[in-house]
Image (cartoon, grey):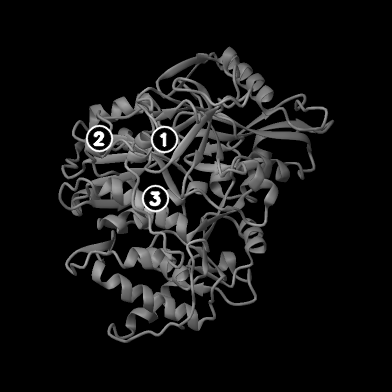
């Protein structure tokens, strides 16, 4: 995904002035790892909004497209972005949208998705994107929490979400069709006097955080402006001709937004936007549009490697595939480099709570990267011992804490969750177990948080347990991750049947399929005699996972070695330290 940066840009001048750092960027006196990149120039003007910052710095050459529709080839030129965004914002204002209002977008990717998001933010309103795969009950819960003024969705999704608000849904297709019929040279007046500060909320993005149900992540204009400065400072350092990205990642996800809106517009690249991921279409688009950068998630890469057609495609324009959203096993990294020897495979790491990537592989040599790269510019990190809370030097294994200008302001109307995720000094506890080596490269080796990573989607066990517990034949239940070669982890229900009940696996999977989005569905059911709990009633999830995996692996006669990022660990030592839920079966 990245534009290569020369080594001369590495090494923060600010860190040098402060003290002589270890080659990893570690300060033993502060217990902090500092980024080895030069700190970007961040705008310090309090009255500045994210869309204005992006649009004022756009490429002026009208012949350069910013976005291309993968299916129709329709283009949006860089020179047209300000007027189109203004046109959409004016229409939104006429619909009653004002500063501080929440606007939901429930839609798959489409050509004007980035502009709709920017237009909402330009009014000082708050955009809240939602996965269109979510069921009505899930969206209804989010709607009650966020209290939106308007909901945008598609004609296809209208029956699913009709009646969520007293106001009718705004259908994207006729809305955009009507706007584009208006004269291009018409001046669209927006109300004067609306002042937007960098500290104002720009997006309310729902995430499961480290544990539990979805929570609204408050990302400010300043968070996104800082991320734009960071990505521009790295990705613009070395342009190798025209960069063309293929967008098959969902734009409602922070990974997609960070790459294809924040990063792309701040560097003057082009994105070909696909409505959905279909491997054959991806291969065709790479050749048709001479795609140079292809951000993906691990399941897509696994499918790519198993495709005979992919092996027969030239993909001659492609320079890099970037993997994020979940871990990619070393086995697939090696297969990828063998199958596509001219393409670099990189990884990066970020969270919804960080407004984009906090590590990047730019400046790291090699054709594939087991690490998730180095800390992004201006990012600080700590590796914290799980048991003692001590800050660890290079080589130490502990929880990754992050700090920087892109960290969220907190969770919406949830002070308890905010205080659990962030300390008073602004350090974000990621819940990921990491190691930073002597070169400042970051490696994920496990997780503390109880989320299940199914095909890069986050699934909260607590949410599924609440639904399972309402089944009339379920005495007790717990949901755990189970290793899966392609999906990474699958949501697995451990069920205690009520007495004299013949509940079957199919009964549970059918029951859940009608109540949650497809990626949250229970994929495996294991019937157990009891669910281990603490005296206070909390599920002892780690003990349950250890017990279940040991039994399942013994029964299936599968090897008891687990693999992640090139390292091996015996299942008997899986919980020698907390947070190793992410290991995969070999």
Q: Badge 1 is on which residue?
A: 34
The local secondary structure at tag 2 comes to: strand
Q: Position of residue 464 (x, y in %)?
A: 66, 43
Which quarter of the rendered picture does the C terminus lie within? top left
Q: Position of residue 375 (x, y in %)?
A: 39, 37
Q: Badge 2 is on which residue?
A: 344
Q: How far is disc 3 from disc 2 in space, using C-alphas? A: 19 Å
The circle drawn on residue 81 is: none
Q: Quadrant of residue 167?
A: bottom right
Front disc: 3 or 1: 1
Q: Does residue 584 appear to the left or right of 367 in the view shown?
A: right
Q: Badge 3 is on which residue?
A: 249
Q: Position of residue 233 (x, y in %)?
A: 30, 48
Q: Residue at x 62, y 63 (%)?
A: 146
Q: Does residue 120 appear to the left or right of 548 in the view shown?
A: left
Residue 573 vertical placement versus 279 (above, below): above
Q: Quadrant of residue 544?
A: top right
Front disc: 1 or 2: 1
Q: State if disc 2 and disc 3 touch (CB < 8 Å).
A: no
């Amino acid at each position: 995904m990245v534009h290569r940066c020369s080594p001369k840009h590495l090494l923060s001048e600010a860190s040098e002035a402060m003290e002589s750092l270890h080659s990893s960027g570690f300060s033993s006196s502060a217990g902090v790892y500092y980024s080895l990149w030069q700190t970007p120039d961040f705008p310090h003007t309090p009255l500045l909004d994210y869309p204005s910052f992006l649009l004022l710095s756009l490429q002026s050459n009208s012949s350069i497209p910013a976005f291309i529709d993968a299916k129709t080839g329709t283009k949006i030129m860089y020179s047209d972005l300000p007027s189109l965004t203004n046109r959409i914002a004016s229409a939104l204002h006429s619909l009653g949208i004002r500063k501080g209002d929440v606007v939901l977008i429930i839609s798959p990717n489409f050509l004007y998705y980035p502009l709709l998001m920017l237009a909402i933010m330009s009014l000082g309103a708050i955009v809240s994107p939602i996965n269109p795969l979510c069921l009505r009950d899930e969206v209804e819960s989010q709607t009650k929490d966020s209290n939106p003024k308007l909901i945008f969705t598609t004609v296809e999704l209208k029956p699913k979400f009709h009646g969520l608000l007293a106001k009718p849904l705004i259908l994207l297709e006729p809305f955009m069709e009507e706007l584009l019929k208006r004269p291009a040279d018409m001046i669209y007046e927006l109300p004067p006097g609306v002042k937007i500060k960098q500290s104002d909320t720009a997006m309310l993005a729902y995430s499961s955080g480290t544990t539990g149900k979805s929570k609204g992540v408050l990302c400010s204009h300043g968070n996104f402006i800082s991320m734009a400065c960071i990505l521009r400072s790295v990705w613009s350092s070395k342009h190798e001709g025209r960069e063309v990205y293929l967008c098959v990642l969902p734009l409602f996800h922070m990974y997609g937004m960070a790459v294809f809106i924040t990063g792309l517009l701040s560097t003057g690249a082009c994105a070909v936007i696909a409505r959905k991921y279909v491997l054959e279409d991806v291969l065709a688009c790479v050749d048709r549009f001479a795609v140079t950068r292809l951000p993906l998630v691990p399941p897509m890469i696994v499918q790519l490697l198993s495709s005979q057609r992919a092996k027969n495609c030239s993909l001659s324009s492609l320079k890099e595939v970037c993997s994020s959203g979940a871990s990619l096993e070393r086995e697939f990294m090696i297969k990828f480099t063998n199958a596509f020897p001219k393409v670099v495979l990189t990884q990066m790491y970020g969270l919804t709570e960080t407004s984009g990537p906090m590590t990047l592989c730019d400046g790291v040599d090699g054709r594939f990267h087991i690490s998730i790269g180095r800390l992004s510019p201006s990012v600080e990190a700590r590796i914290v011992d799980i048991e003692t809370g001590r800050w660890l030097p290079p080589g130490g294994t502990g929880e990754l804490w992050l700090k920087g200008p892109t960290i969220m302001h907190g969770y919406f109307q949830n002070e308890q969750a905010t205080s659990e995720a962030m300390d008073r000094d602004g350090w974000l506890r990621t819940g990921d177990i990491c190691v930073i080596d002597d070169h400042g490269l970051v490696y994920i080796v496990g997780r503390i948080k109880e989320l299940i990573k199914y095909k890069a989607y986050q699934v909260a066990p607590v949410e599924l347990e609440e639904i399972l517990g309402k089944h009339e034949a379920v005495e007790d239940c717990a949901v755990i991750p189970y290793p899966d070669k392609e999906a990474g982890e699958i949501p697995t229900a451990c069920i205690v049947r009520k007495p004299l009940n013949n509940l079957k696996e199919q009964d549970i999977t059918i029951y859940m399929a009608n109540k949650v989005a497809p990626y949250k569905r229970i994929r495996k059911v294991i019937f157990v005699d009891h669910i281990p709990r603490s005296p206070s009633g909390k599920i002892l999830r780690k003990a349950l996972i250890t017990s279940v995996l040991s039994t399942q692996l013994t029964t299936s006669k599968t090897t008891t070695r687990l693999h992640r990022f090139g390292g091996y660990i015996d299942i008997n030592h899986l919980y020698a330290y907390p947070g190793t839920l992410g290991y995969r079966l070999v």
